[in-house]
Amino acid sequence: MITSWGLNLHRERREGRCRDAGCEFPGRLRTVAYGYREDIGVLFLPASLLAAWLLSVTGVPAPGSDPETDFASNAIRWMMSVPVGGMFIASGLMHTVFAKRTAESIGWKSNGFQYEIGFVSFGIGAAGINAAYLDRSAWVALTIVVSVFLLGAAANHIYETVRNHNVEPGNTVVLAYDVGLPLSLWALVVLI
């Protein structure tokens, strides 16, 4: 398994998987073909949230809005389009098409439940893209679904980190998205 940032150095040594010179240097970056870091994909989650905020703050009209749309409505449309719509569809692909690699990046083994996560992610993503063109009632409903799903996932990732010392980037870095997106959505719902 390819890890990054040296976060699993202790576990690799304990399990006898640390055999190369790279294990001796915390903070190392392991790469695969063409220098692509296998676990870098997890950064797209918080990046999508940041992108939605930047598009909102700069006043770029979101899908389903027009130049006269107020800030909060425009921002929540961006949230529904990019971090909910786009990233949940991407997550669906990762948990179905690239299931084994995705499970490894989280520190898990792939199983049938992972495909269920993928299919529910496809549904949430499609609902997010649709909600961008709707109104507050759709935004509130989807905010509830996304919040329960992501905050539950965040609690599980924290449990995995504390209980099982799972510090894989797919288990830790993802917390910025798992907590940041529900907080962003609720802040915007309150403003609308």
Image (cartoon, helix red, strand yellow):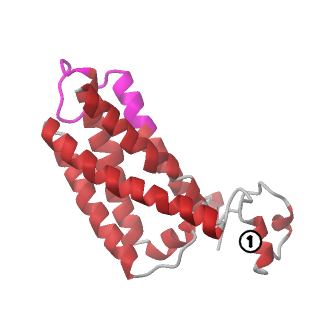
Query: SS at mark 1?
Result: helix
Magenta: main secondary structure equals: loop
Q: Give the residue displayed 28% in from the left and 43% down from the top.
A: 81
Residue 11, above or below 130: below
Q: Quadrant of the N terminus?
A: bottom right
Q: Residue at x 30, y 31 (%)?
A: 188
The quadrant the C terminus occupies is: top left
Residue visible at 34% across and 68% down? 118
170 and 137: which is toward the camera: 137
Would you identify the image quadrant in which residue 150 lies? bottom left
Q: Which residue is mark 1?
A: 11
Question: Can residue 166 be seen from the camera position used here?
Answer: no
Residue 172 located left or right of residue 22 = left
**Residue found at x 52% / y 61%:** 157
Q: On the rendered structure, is 92 left or right of 69? A: right
Labels in figure, total: 1
Residue 53 is situated, as x and y percent measured from the top left of the image, at: 40, 31
On the image, the x and y values in percent for residue 147 come to: 33, 50
Residue type, numbered disc 1: Arg
Magenta segment includes 54: yes
Is 93 drawn above or below residue 100 in the view shown? Answer: above
Tell me where residue 159 appears, x and y as whole percent.
Answer: 55, 63
Disc 1 crowd rating (10 Å Cα; few below 14, some 14-19, many 20+) is some
Answer yes or no: is residue 122 visible.
Answer: yes
Give residue 137's position: percent from left, percent from top: 13, 40
- The image quarter containing residue 171 is bottom right
Q: Which residues are magenta?
A: 50-70
Is 80 situated above or below 174? above
Q: Is residue 161 shown left or right of residue 174? A: right
Is residue 49 in the magenta section?
no
